[in-house]
Image: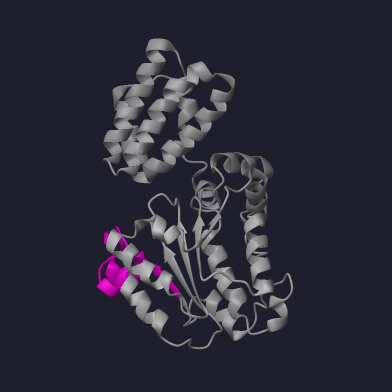
Amino acid sequence: MFESILGQKKIKKIISNQVKSGKIAHAYIFVGQDGVGKRLTAVEFAKILNCNVDDFIKTDAGTCGKCISCKKIEKNIHPDLHFIDFARQAELEEECLEKQRTLKIETIRYMQKEVATKIHEGKWKIFIIEPAERMNAAAANSLLKTLEEPPENTIIILIAKHKEAIPQTILSRVQTLFFQPLGQNEISSWLMLNCSVDAAKARDIAELSEGSLENAKKLVDKNEKEEFSLWLKFKTRNFYISDILELSKNIAAAGALECVDAMIAEAKKDFRMYPQRTAPALDLLSASRVLLLKNVNAMTVLDNLFFDLSDLKKMSGLL
């Protein structure tokens, strides 16, 4: 089962054994960074449970992939598979997706109405809540009522990057499955097979991806761009003020967080060989990353970062 999911052997085994034994939990939380297969696993789980060919569920294949149920889930049109996410909330509120910041109680109440209805055509109703850590307090309290009285043949899967923001009252009522970062060999092999990337480039991208296939896919397209050679440039040349301002402008437009992540990954390589020389630069990069995650103006963050890195190089030669 779960042959289309990269890595995550332990989780695949746990869920496969539950499916074969019929001992399926009524609620789960899949925890892990982006790009490690949480949502794909949840969808594949739904496909396995609703496959119309029972013989496949009893084998390692899991699904036939050809029945009406499997095809509808693949096309995201199965009436018993529900995504409770920002896209659905935006639709309910008739607002644009970009305005969504938290999952609200109204969205959970919409889900609860769907939970209360009869199954349309499948064997199980599956509700995938993502990002679960972005539920506000009212939404979380409302969800708790459903988890306390789980309906038959209904599974709720919460998907989160981390579980610290999830109330303990919810965590105590769901089965937690931790998704590990993908291995570099897994990512590089996938890139060579699916993206026509040569072995050397695939290895470089896999190392930069920090265990995320999502990051790796982005890096395939951006690998040749300026931001992914920045660390080398700061080590080997001096920048004038005009250079830095122009660089900040270009990188902010291309993707500031991706740029800083790439520089951190490259700096970590140097840190293994030269920890004392590289540590101050890593501190600057990490602090800038935190600011970007807090939505501080990207150009301001990058200007300060690049000036600080240049000063670091000039004053102490630490790069």
What residue range appears in magenta? Answer: 82-107
- Is the residue 149 above or below the residue 120 in the image? above
Q: Nearer the viewer, residue 155 or 83?
A: 155
Q: Residue 79, image x and y in percent?
A: 47, 83
Residue 131 makes an appearance in the image: no
Side (left or right) of 46 relative to 55: left
Side (left or right) of 166 relative to 273: left
Tell me what residue is drawn at x 68 percent, y 50 percent: 189
Q: Residue 134, image x and y in percent?
A: 35, 57
- Is the residue 262 above or below the residue 129 in the image? above
Q: Residue 114, image x and y in percent?
A: 39, 81
Residue 210 makes an appearance in the image: yes
Side (left or right) of 266 relative to 258: right
Tell me what residue is drawn at x 69 percent, y 83 percent: 54
Q: Residue 135, image x and y in percent?
A: 34, 60
Tell me what residue is drawn at x 47 percent, y 33 percent: 264
In magenta segment, residue 49: no
